[in-house]
Amino acid sequence: MTTKTDKILIFDTTLRDGEQCPGATLNIDEKLVIAKQLARLGVDIIEAGFAFASPGDFEAVSKIAEIVGTENGPVICSLARAIKADIEAAAQALKPAAKGRIHTFISTSDIHLEYQLRKSRAEVLAIAQDMVAYAKSFMADVEFSPMDAARSDPEFLYQVLEATIAAGATTINIPDTVGYITPSEFGAIIKGIKENVPNIDQAIISVHGHNDLGLAVANFLEAVKNGARQLECTINGIGERAGNASLEELVMALHVRRQYFNPYLGRPEESQESLTNIDTREIYRTSRLVSNLTGMLVQPNKAIVGTNAFAHESGIHQDGVLKNKLTYEIMDAQLIGLTDNQIVLGKHSGRNAFRTRLKELGFELSDSELNKAFVRFKEVADKKKEISDRDLEAIVNDEIQQAPDLFRVELVQVSCGSNARPTATVTLRTPEGQELTDAAIGTGPVDAVYKAINRVVNVPNELIEFSVQSVTAGIDAIGEVTIRLRYESRVFSGHAANTDIIVASAQAYVNALNRLYAALQTQQKPESVSAQKV
Ligand code: KIV
Ligand code: ZN
């Protein structure tokens, strides 16, 4: 079999590697919302999780396989160590998918073999080959990753790749696990693989890389020039440590500079055909959704999706852009789905207009979600005259956020000012349905609110991050609050949007506490979960 593709395949691992960053833990419903959006974005493969890691991961992979893994949808993939039990769990979880893929891996670098696996090269070679064959007995589509490939001895790497392709791997993925490699070195590794693995034309070459030196995207682009045809990446570049290669940066680099890349794919330089299957207009919305649900903020100067990415501050630049956008802009903001923030709705807009606009924005809500979101819309429209697309997105993202509904904020009241001691009163509804009220004094209004909430919830925790961002310009803008708190060694995030930032702060905090509370209830020990992460 010859495996050829005239496009660069986008393998999204936001829900597996991306979810491995501290505090980014998502529940099953949130994973499903993201998976649906990834399908809308047009990714070719969704790595939905690591089925063996926990019952929650298994259920998430299985649900995504069932609901998103349709005939015309993306391939749904589960990670599995090169261990029979892992592979069996992956195969079982992927059963409902029309197109499933098992992604199995084992380390090949001497440093991992000696200190982590304590195995010889011969043993690793045999395990890799056997476990790919075992995965193949369940599924035609099997991906194999020699972990830490970028630091592995090339000759041993070629041997392992040849054996695993012979055993049935249809994609071989080359990870720069520790984010160590530089672009020309990575390009040379891919070139070496193409030249030295005799059966390489029977598999797609994929790359996976971490951003420890800020080089992941550059490394991937060099890999493409040398024959890589699948890129493993995450939305906003989230992931282990400094994160993974960022999907939006890769896709837009390949789009904006397609004339440069075309010849490497055997196309005429002037071809306008897209190099990936991604609908770039869905990029911004996907970025916002992932940021809101994971609590991982996007830095303002982040390429493509940062709030400053299309803002021109310098007078000379502004002058040029006004005369002709091409003077200082290499891409149009609309290409990534950033609208001009038009005012679309107001307090007299009815349910139908609301539903229609949401549909145009790509949100498909169930009737009950729509009802909830409409109530919120009316509340906001009462306070804020003009509701823009960005406001609508904030409202809907907030409403579909699936943090467990255990404690609920019923009332927040603060008194503060230059000559006052900031005091807050809060009323929370407990998971048992009781209304509890408490009050506290703090160094500021948010501190007072958080102290009062802590008196009710009574789970010791440390607030490690608090951020407020406004959704649009204007004094009546919706404020989005994102917080992260630590409990023992685990981090939990919370997010909320409201025109009143004190109320948003309270809701974001309760949101994070609910995640913490739910984790304590299921008694998922932090160690047992992180031990399964790779
Ligand atoms: O970084 C890595 O090596 C991985 C593998 C499991 C592909 O995430
Ligand atoms: Zn990784």
Image: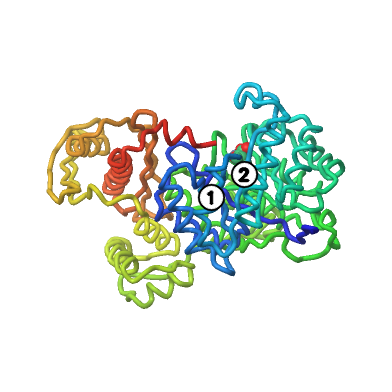
- Mark closest to the chain's N terminus, 1 or 2: 1
The front one of 254 and 533 is: 533
Please name the colour scheme applied to the rendered image: rainbow
Q: Where is residue 65 shown, x and y percent of the image?
A: 51, 59
Q: Secondary structure at mark 2?
A: strand
Q: Where is residue 226 shown, x and y percent of the image?
A: 81, 46
Q: Are marks 1 and 2 in contact (CB under 8 Å)?
A: yes
- Gap in Å between the C-alphas at discs 1 and 2? 9 Å
Quadrant holding the N terminus = bottom right
Quadrant holding the C terminus = top right
Amino acid type of the residue that numbered disc 1 sits on in the rendered structure: Ala
466 left or right, relative to 130: left
126 in relation to 335, above or below: above
Q: Quadrant of residue 377?
A: bottom left
Residue under label 2, please give it: 104
Q: Where is residue 389 shown, x and y percent of the image?
A: 45, 64
Amino acid type of the residue that numbered disc 2 sits on in the rendered structure: Thr
> Looking at the image, which residue sits at the far top?
115
Label 1 Cα crowd, 10 Å radius (few <14 / some 14-19 / many 20+): many
Q: Does residue 10 appear anywhere in the picture?
A: yes
Residue under label 1, please give it: 90
